Image: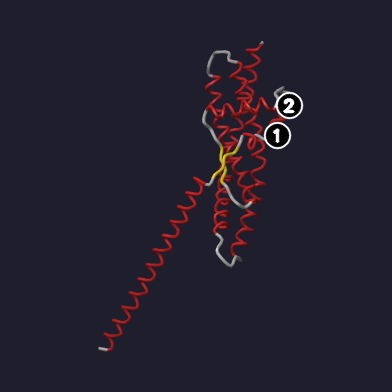
Amino acid sequence: MIIFYNFKNRSLVFFVIFFIISVLIFFSSCLSSYRTLFIANNNETDQIELHIKDIFQEDIIRSFENHGYNYNSLFIYSVLQQMFEESNICFFMIYSEDNTTQDALKEIAIIESAEKASSFAIKKSEEILSNDSSNIEAAEKIFILSFSVKQLLINCIKNIDPLKEELEQIIEEKRWDMEYEEEEDYELFFDIIKLENGVSCLNKIKRTLLINIEEVTKIADKTINYIKHYSD
C-alpha cells in the first residue's frame, strides 16, 4: 500500500510539473508571436516618407556641373520629382524616437531607396530608348535620372561598410543599456530589432547595387549619345 501510495504521489508530482512546463511554453510562444506581430505592424505603419532631397543630396546634384553638364539644381530636382510621382514611386524610412537610431535608419533607407531608384531608372530607360522617335525631352529626363542614380549608387556603395560598423556599435551600446536597465525598455528592444534588420539588409543589398551601377552607367552613356545624335 505504501509503495502504491508513493507511486500515486510521484505520478501526481510529474503531472503537475508537466502541466506547469506546458503552460510556460504556451505563454512563451504567445509572447513571441505577439512581439513578432508587433514588430511587423510597426514596420508597416511606423514609417515616414523621404523627400527627393533626402535621397539625392547636394553633392549628387553638384556632380552634374563637375562633369560638365549644364543643369541647375532646381531643374534636376523638378525632373526627378516629376518622374517618381508620375510612376507613383515613394520612399520611406522606419521611425525611431531616439535620434542616434533615427540617423542610422535614415542612412539605411537611403541605400534601400538607391536600389529602388536604380530599378526604376533601368525600367524607365527601356520604355523611352526602345522607341525610334527622337524625343529629346524624354531622353534628357532619362539622362538626368540615370546620372543622378549613378552618383547615388556610388555614394551608397562607399557608405555600406562604414555604416555596418556604425550600426553594430550602436546595437552593442543599446544591448548594454538594455541589460542594465532596472525595468524592461521596449523602445530599446525594438530599436535593436530595427538596426539588426538594417545590418541584414546591407549584407544582402551590396551585390545588387554593384550590378545596378553598371546598368545605369550604360544608360547614362547611351542616353547622352542619343541626345547628341538627335540634336545634331
Q: Nearer the viewer, residue 185 or 7?
A: 185
Mark seen at residue 58: 1
Report the colour scheme: secondary structure
Distance (Cα) linking label 1 and label 2? 12 Å
Mark seen at residue 65: 2
Q: Is residue 44 left or right of residue 223?
A: left
Total tally of numbered discs in the picture: 2
**Residue type at the position of mark 2:** Glu
**Residue type at the position of mark 1:** Glu
Corner quadrant of residue 115: top right
- Note whether 43 is above or below 187 in the view shown: above
Q: Nearer the viewer, residue 203 or 194?
A: 194
Q: For the N terminus, which image quadrant?
A: bottom left
Which residue occupies 61% across, 40% down? 110
Q: How many other residues sit within 10 Å of disc 1, few (<14), some (14-19) or many (≥20)?
A: few
SS category of the residue bearing label 1: helix
Which residue is at the far left? Answer: 1
Which residue is at the far bottom? Answer: 2
Precedes in sequence: disc 1 or disc 2: 1
- Note whether 14 is above or below 121 in the view shown: below
Image coordinates for residue 219, horizontal then vertical, percent = 60, 25
SS category of the residue bearing label 2: helix
Image coordinates for residue 21, horizontal then vertical, percent = 39, 69
Image coordinates for residue 128, horizontal then vertical, percent = 55, 20
Image coordinates for residue 41, horizontal then vertical, percent = 47, 49
